[in-house]
């Protein structure tokens, strides 16, 4: 599913974010990425999504070598990956329905299928009755559920979540975790960067810890391992 | 899943979708839409009025130029063969479009007629006509007049040529300058319009740069993002031509009805309302659509690199 070999990333401003990362993640896994702020978690995630390019090393996602891929193909690669952000990144002027439908319009789905699939995911995240609302009219947790719905409406093989619970209160966070676990149970690979010790230690999954641009720990059913 | 297949041909429903989104954006952008349409409207009224003025002046100039002819006075002593030979020589010049023979009797009649009442005194000359036979020569391009006149003057059997040297020279110089100045002004106006409009549209797009970034992260291709902006720009441009076209048609209709009676000089004549006003409207529509699309697509281009 994901294969990184000797990945090294230095930003133009001189910051070295990743300093030789080797990792393999299999289809269907649920992986936490933990580590202090500025350790390289975000860069690690952005590499998978081709939001940034590695300075050196090989990144293969869904059997596509992201280093050799042409600029024009990038949108098509992104369609197979659902992404959930800490700040939701919803289109502010579109309704909940339209926001989710956008991911399907991009792949030129028929309006009939768009309707059906959007309503399906809205049902899954429990927001069927909020389809006509715009993001500003929703709570943070609801907005995050919309962004998860958008990420999975395409049935991607991989969902990346960058601190999805970072802006949410604990109760809401558990709701988000339940949804992510359910998606994972259907066979979707989930990679989630998080600072939540509680979540990592309660919902036991593989934990990859990144510090100073290196993977310092990689264990199945691991612990958060940092004092908050 | 075959989402990664590259679709190069847009499906019709996607085209419909882009059109719908473009329309919606016009509505959603509210005051920015009004500002953009206002910018198009103002500049196109200017461009339209100026175009109408320039095209009419150009027509007047053209009429004046077309009236220019070379009168070739034939030597009184020339034999019929020489006269015929002269005609062949003049016709052989590539710049010449027509050569008409006018006998001295016809010339005298013209003269008498043109002088009206006083002309009757010239009737005396009918017995002993002092005038020359004349070839009236017209050139393909009026600007060649001087050149051709000089060439004719060198031919045998030519007494002299007359084309109103002084006046013609000045007329041509004047026309040349006024045409060039007009062209420069129109180009300048159109560019000002494009600049103004693309700036206004840029503001509306600037506000949406974050949205464009999000769309790209969700897997939208550049063209997928660009199309609604294309539609939006096109509609803004076309909506911006409504008032200018109304103004031009109404204004020109009014002028057409009134001005031709005021100006009696026969070379000053407005271009006829039909088809000129319609042609001008079409031109304004085309300019409006062009600057709308151009301003919009150019502005969005910058934000597509995510």
Image (cartoon, coloured by chain):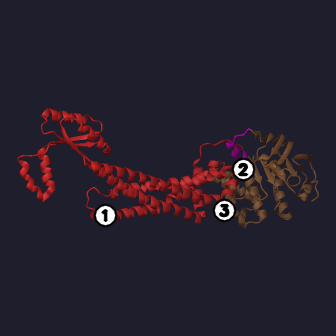
Chain colours: A brown, B red
- Give the total number of marks visible in the rendering: 3
Residue B215 or residue B68, whichever sits in front: B68
Horizontal and vertical percent for residue B287? Answer: 48, 54
Kindly identify which numbered label has been placed on residue A93. 3
Does residue B84 appear in this view?
yes
Q: Chain of mark 2?
A: A
Residue lying at 15% horizontally and 50% vertically, measured from the top left: B110
Mark 2 = which residue?
A: A154
Q: Are marks 3 and 2 in contact (CB under 8 Å)?
A: no
Q: CA distance from mark 1 to mark 3?
A: 53 Å
In the image, residue B55 sits, relative to residue B262, either above or below, namely above
A116 relative position to B286: left or right:
right
Tell which tag, 1 or 2, sits nearer the viewer: 1
Q: Could you tell me if the residues under marks 1 and 3 are in contact, i.e. CB atoms within 8 Å?
A: no
Disc 1 is attached to a residue of which chain? B
The image shows residue A124, relative to residue A217, as above or below, that is below
Secondary structure of residue under mark 3 = loop
Highlighted range, magenta: A68-78
Q: Are marks 3 and 2 on the same chain?
A: yes
């Amino acid at each position: 599913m994901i294969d990184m070999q000797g990945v090294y990333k230095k930003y133009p401003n001189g910051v070295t974010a990743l300093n030789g990362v080797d990792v393999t993640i299999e289809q269907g896994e649920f992986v936490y990425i933990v580590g202090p702020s500025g350790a390289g978690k975000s860069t690690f995630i952005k590499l998978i999504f081709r939001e940034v390019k590695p300075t050196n090393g090989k990144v293969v996602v869904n059997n596509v070598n992201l280093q050799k891929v042409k600029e024009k193909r990038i949108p098509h690669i992104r369609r197979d990956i659902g992404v959930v952000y800490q700040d939701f990144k919803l289109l502010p002027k579109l309704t909940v329905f339209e926001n989710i439908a956008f991911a399907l319009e991009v792949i030129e789905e028929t309006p009939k299928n768009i309707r059906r699939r959007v309503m399906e995911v809205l049902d899954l995240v429990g927001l069927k009755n909020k389809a006509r609302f715009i993001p500003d009219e929703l709570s943070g947790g609801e907005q995050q559920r919309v962004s998860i719905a958008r990420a999975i409406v395409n049935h991607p093989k991989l969902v990346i979540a960058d601190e999805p619970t970072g802006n949410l209160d604990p109760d809401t966070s558990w709701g988000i975790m339940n949804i992510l676990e359910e998606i994972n149970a259907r066979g979707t690979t989930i990679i989630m960067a998080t600072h939540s010790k509680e979540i990592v230690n309660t919902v036991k999954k593989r934990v990859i810890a990144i510090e100073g641009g290196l993977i310092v720990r990689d264990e199945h059913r691991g612990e958060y391992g940092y004092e908050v | 899943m075959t989402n990664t297949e590259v679709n190069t041909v847009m499906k019709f429903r996607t085209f419909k979708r882009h059109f719908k989104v473009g329309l919606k954006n016009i509505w959603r952008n509210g005051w920015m839409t009004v500002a953009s349409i206002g910018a198009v409207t103002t500049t196109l009224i200017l461009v339209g009025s100026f175009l109408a003025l320039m095209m009419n002046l150009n027509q007047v100039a053209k009429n004046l130029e077309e009236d220019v002819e070379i009168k070739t006075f034939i030597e009184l002593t020339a034999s019929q063969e020489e006269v015929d030979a002269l005609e062949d020589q003049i016709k052989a010049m590539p710049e010449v479009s027509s050569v008409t023979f006018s006998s001295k009797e016809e010339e005298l009649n013209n003269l008498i007629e043109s002088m009206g009442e006083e002309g009757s005194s010239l009737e005396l000359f009918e017995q002993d006509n002092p005038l020359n036979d004349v070839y009236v020569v017209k050139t393909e391009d009026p600007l060649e007049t001087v050149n051709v006149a000089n060439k004719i003057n060198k031919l045998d059997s030519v007494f002299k040529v007359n084309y109103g040297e002084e006046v013609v020279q000045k007329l041509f110089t004047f026309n040349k300058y006024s045409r060039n100045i007009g062209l420069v002004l129109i180009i300048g106006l159109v560019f000002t319009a494009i600049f103004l409009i693309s700036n206004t549209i840029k503001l509306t797009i600037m506000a949406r740069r974050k949205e464009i970034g999000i769309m790209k992260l969700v897997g939208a291709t550049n063209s997928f993002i660009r199309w609604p902006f294309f539609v939006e720009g096109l509609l803004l441009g076309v909506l911006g031509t409504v008032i200018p076209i109304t103004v031009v048609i109404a204004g020109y209709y009014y002028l057409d009805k009134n001005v031709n009676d005021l100006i009696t000089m026969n070379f000053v004549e407005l271009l006829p309302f039909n088809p000129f006003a319609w042609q001008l409207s079409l031109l304004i529509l085309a300019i409006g659509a062009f600057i709308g699309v151009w301003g919009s697509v150019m502005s969005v281009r910058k934000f597509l690199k995510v």
